[in-house]
Amino acid sequence: MTTAPPVLVESEDELEPAAVAAMLTAPSYPSLLELLGIIGADAEDLLPLVGPATADHALLAEVTSLANQLRAAAGLEVPEVDLAARKDELDALQQGIAPGEGLLAILALTVSTATVRRWHGARGLSPELSWTVLADLGRQMRVHRTGTGRLGLHQLNWVTGNWAGRLVHLGRLQFDLSRRRVARLEHGAERTGPDEPQRWVVGTHIPATGPLDPAEVDASFDAAVAYFTEHYADLNADRPADAPRFGHEFTCDSWLLSDQFEEITGSESNLARFAARWQLIGTDPQGADGALFFTFGLRPPVDPAALPRRTRLERGVADRLADGRGWTTGSGRLLR
């Protein structure tokens, strides 16, 4: 008899402050940072802060508590770890050893990979691809440095979502698991009530790792269909016969789902062709902050007139922000 795949993996133990301090100061810690994508200036700035953080009992206790929350469970139905809700508090704690934001979360994330890696293994993700997922921590830290010029992390809940185990990185694109409202998926309808039917879909994310070459995008979608249909076949259970089979239905909520790329970069550009793949199921005209962040790595307040205009994309986005047209983002659905 075939054993049903797990719906979650729970931590086998709870860390104590002494164990966290030992992990952070171990000779192998720099190698762990490299596996997590924390390299270059970020690693150089982070390592000297480890000693002061472990020597401060309050900071070490907080890092330990955060690490245990992150390690508690990974899977399909697990409690959310909402670090963003505590951002101001955590940032205030770190000021005694370093200005900025995100340090305590970064340290906790680095010592809390065991549970999510067990979940990855249980759901057929190779060790190499597992580390690729977790290396998104370093990528988000580099995005933070681009916008601020210093060590830190803004995208707290994005990264903790990775640690919950529902995201994979397959080629050019990232994919995650979430429940979406059926009426929204099929009709673009707004919420009708708390008991509205939902189903599992594969969300799509576009990391800033280079051009959106159409062939690479196709290869990512093909890999996602193969992976999710094989290793999450249980999510087809109780799915209506007229619904797309799980692993073939994708969603995307992104500033990139916009017809404005046709005007800025041309209809044959990679960006416009990516946007054209999707059936729009919703739009949001208040997307200027997303366009600002993903184009320039900056957050408000920013003077649009001072933004760089080195490429067609930068010129187009900067001009729209400067003249008040703003940016409309989209939510899309794609069947393969």
Image (spheres, rainbow, N blue to C red):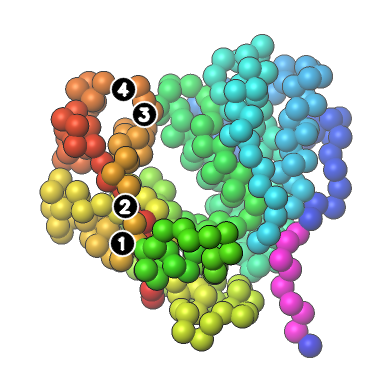
Dot 2 corresponds to which residue? 283
Return the x and y of residue 91 as percentages of the image width and height.
61, 21
Q: Identity of the amino acid at label 3?
A: Leu
**What residue do we see at 78% from left, 34% from top?**
65
Q: Are marks 2 and 1 in contact (CB under 8 Å)?
A: yes
Magenta stretch: give its range. Answer: 2-9
Q: Please give left or right for residue 66 compared with residue 98 in the image.
A: right
**Residue found at the very far top of the displayed protein:** 96
Query: Mark 3 packing: few (<14 Cα in 10 Å), some, or many (20+)?
Result: some
Dot 4 corresponds to which residue? 302
Q: How far apart are marks 1 and 3 (CA)?
A: 27 Å
287 drawn magenta: no
Q: Identity of the amino acid at label 4?
A: Val
Q: Do the residues labelled 4 and 3 touch (CB within 8 Å)?
A: yes
Q: Is 286 rendered above or below residue 221?
A: above
Q: Which of marks 2 and 4 is nearer the N terminus?
A: 2
Taking depth in this image into account, of 194 and 333 the one nearest to the observer is 194
Q: Which of marks 2 and 3 is nearer the N terminus?
A: 2
Q: Residue 298 carries which label?
A: 3
Q: Distance between the residues labelled 2 and 3?
A: 22 Å
Query: Mark 4 packing: few (<14 Cα in 10 Å), some, or many (20+)?
Result: few
Dot 1 corresponds to which residue? 280
Q: Distance between the residues labelled 1 and 4?
A: 30 Å
Q: How far apart are marks 2 and 1 (CA)?
A: 7 Å
Q: Is 229 rendered above or below residue 220?
A: below
Quarter in which the C terminus is drawn: bottom left
Q: Earlier in the sequence, mark 1 or mark 3?
A: 1
